[in-house]
Image (cartoon, helix red, strand yellow):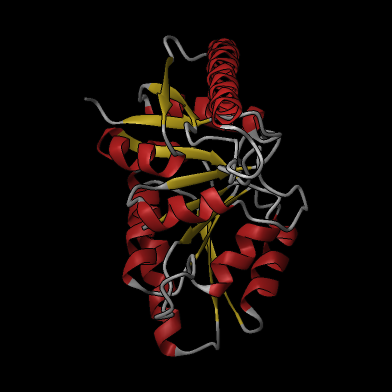
């Protein structure tokens, strides 16, 4: 199958942003767009000890009722999913996408995305899902697991869409971020969009040469590019640069140096994701 932009939607407040950023990416990349909704088929009713004082007949009757309720919930969830996919498709058509596709699957989001990874060129997903805590600095557990599992670029979308006009890549000279610069340079997703390259650290010869490499790579590909080396706390420095220059899309590497396997990515990336109000493109 042709690699496509895949957008994971649910009933969360982020789904509208996911739809619009996915449509933007699909048009810019000239890639097919598919909306995906996953119905989690894990039973919603906790299994309880029904032995107690219930007679065998009453216990069997109760189990039948619970099974019936689970079946009804599943049917409702399927229908809700179909309606969400229909609305997403209509929204994408309004945004200019000719023939967006829709897919509804049963299972878990992470497992489903892992199965479909070979079909993806880019995954667009919301910061939190409909079941997540709504605190502004909370990062949805599904997003964390998706980033750990997939090896495709992931665009984390905010609630509302703003067409990107200035992009910033947090650059540290690592293999991941060098690949990120090369991807930005050649990707039609960023055609005509100025790119800012920021290194957080001391002004050293090594940092200067890394920055010059990044800028020359982007400029040779036809991009308007500028960069900076700034000392300070990584998250605060990147956020300050973002605000000063009106950055509306951040590119970061989803990598971590920690050996603790349960960590999502490096602590800086996690903090930026949690606090971000703009879209973040994560590279693996």
In the rendered image, residue 251, in percent from the top left (x then y), is placed at 51, 55
Q: Is residue 145 left or right of residue 168?
A: left
Kindly identify the residue that appears in the image at 63 percent across and 67 percent down: 271
Q: Quadrant of residue 157?
A: top right
Q: Nearer the viewer, residue 66 or 181?
A: 66
Q: How many marks?
A: 0
Which residue corresponds to the image point at 63% horizontal and 30% vertical from the top-left? 15
The image position of residue 50, as x and y in percent, is 60, 41
- Quarter that holds the N terminus: top left
User: Where 220 sits versus 159, above or below?
Assistant: below
Give above or below for 100 relative to 233.
above
x and y percentages locating residue 239 in the rendered image: 69, 65
Closer to us: 151 or 77? 77
The quarter of the rendered structure image containing the C terminus is bottom left
Which of these two is toward me, 64 or 263? 64
At x 53%, y 27%, the residue is 60
Residue drawn at (50%, 44%) of the image: 155
Q: Position of residue 280 (x, y in %)?
A: 56, 51
Q: Nearer the viewer, residue 79 or 117?
A: 79
Residue 24 visible from this viewpoint: yes
């Amino acid at each position: 199958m042709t690699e496509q932009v895949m957008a994971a939607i649910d009933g969360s407040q982020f789904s509208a942003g996911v739809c619009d950023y996915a449509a933007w990416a699909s048009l810019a990349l000239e890639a097919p767009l598919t909306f995906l909704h996953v119905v989690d088929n894990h039973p919603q009713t906790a299994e309880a000890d029904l032995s107690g004082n219930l007679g065998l007949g009453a216990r069997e009757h109760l189990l039948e009722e619970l099974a019936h309720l689970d079946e009804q919930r599943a049917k409702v969830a399927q229908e809700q999913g179909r309606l969400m996919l229909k609305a997403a498709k209509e929204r994408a058509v309004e945004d200019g996408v000719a023939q967006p596709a829709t897919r509804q699957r049963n299972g878990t989001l992470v497992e489903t995305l892992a199965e479909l990874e070979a079909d993806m060129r880019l995954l667009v997903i919301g910061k939190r899902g409909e079941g997540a805590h709504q605190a502004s600095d909370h990062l949805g557990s599904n997003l964390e697991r998706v980033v750990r599992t997939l090896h495709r670029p992931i665009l984390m979308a905010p609630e509302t869409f703003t067409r990107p006009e200035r992009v910033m890549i947090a650059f540290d000279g690592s293999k991941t971020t060098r690949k990120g610069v090369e991807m930005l340079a050649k990707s039609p997703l960023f055609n005509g969009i100025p790119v800012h390259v920021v290194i957080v650290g001391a002004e050293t010869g090594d940092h200067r040469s890394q920055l010059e490499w990044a800028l020359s790579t982007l400029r040779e590909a036809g991009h308007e590019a500028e960069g900076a080396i700034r000392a300070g706390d990584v998250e605060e420095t990147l956020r300050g640069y973002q605000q000063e220059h009106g950055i509306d899309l951040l590119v970061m590497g989803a990598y971590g140096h920690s050996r603790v396997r349960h960590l999502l990515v490096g602590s800086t990336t996690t903090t930026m994701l949690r606090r971000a109000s703009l879209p973040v493109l994560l590279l693996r």
